[in-house]
Amino acid sequence: MKVYLISNNLVVQNISYESDDSLEQKRINRPLSIEGEQKAEKLGKVLDIDAIYSSNYASAISTAKYLSREKDLPIYIDAALADAKIGDPGKYNIKMLRYMQERNFDYKFPEGESLNETRVRIAKSIDKILLKEECDVAIFTHKRAILSYLTGITKQGFNLDSRLLLTYNDCAIIDDTEKDLDIIAIEFANKKIVDITALDL
């Protein structure tokens, strides 16, 4: 059984909000960019799976819809697959949060989530999926959520740019540099991980 963790990072950047929605709500509602839609459509034609799960973010659902249409499968929405909660940054910014969290997996802003807290949440959700499914599954979630989950099952180090680097069997799986699309394939046997690979589209 394979589980594909997928994050489409191509979202619309030039949005101005007239409402007082929270930062977290804005992240949930942010749509894919045109390029993001194109990547999602291409992904829908190449990935061979039998079940689809997604976070409740617009970008994740919009990415999953192409695969759902191609395979004629429903999308199961699970809010527990959401991205790591930022919380209240105060006088700091998200770049600083990422820097600190890469070096301390328990660090978080007030009302936010640490990488360790996000890892536990995502792992519980994936464990539930593993109990329910016995087929190959696509899980549409988010970069930080994937990174958090993988910290529990990979080795950690830093790349030449001093960004967090996660490896499995001496192969780079993910780092905190920006990619258009992150696809991590995790192979399970008897509910245990036997291989992890990073895929390119």
Image: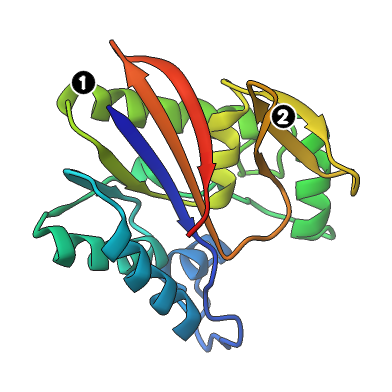
In the image, taking residue 76 as reference, residue 126 lies left or right, namely right
Question: Secondary structure beneath disc 1?
Answer: helix
Q: Position of residue 40 (x, y in %)?
A: 37, 69
Question: Secondary structure beneath disc 2?
Answer: loop
Around disc 1, counting alpha carbons within 10 Å, would you say few (fewer than 14), some (14 to 19), or many (20 or more)?
Answer: few
In the image, taking residue 26 as reference, residue 112 lies left or right, namely right
Q: Is residue 200 shown to the viewer in this render?
A: yes
Q: Position of residue 96 (x, y in %)?
A: 83, 53
Q: Residue at the spot x=54%, y=64% of the render?
A: 9
Q: Amino acid at mark 1?
A: Leu
Give above or below for 15 relative to 77: below
Which image quarter: residue 111?
top right
Q: Position of residue 39 (x, y in %)?
A: 43, 71
Q: Residue at the spot x=28%, y=10% of the render?
A: 190
Q: Amino acid at mark 2?
A: Phe
Q: Position of residue 189 (x, y in %)?
A: 31, 15
88 or 34, which lies in front?
Answer: 34
Mark 2 highlights which residue? 105
Q: Residue at the spot x=75%, y=37% of the render?
A: 165
In the rendered image, the quadrant that contains the N terminus is top left
Badge number at residue 70:
none
Cα separation, mark 2 vs mark 1, equals 28 Å
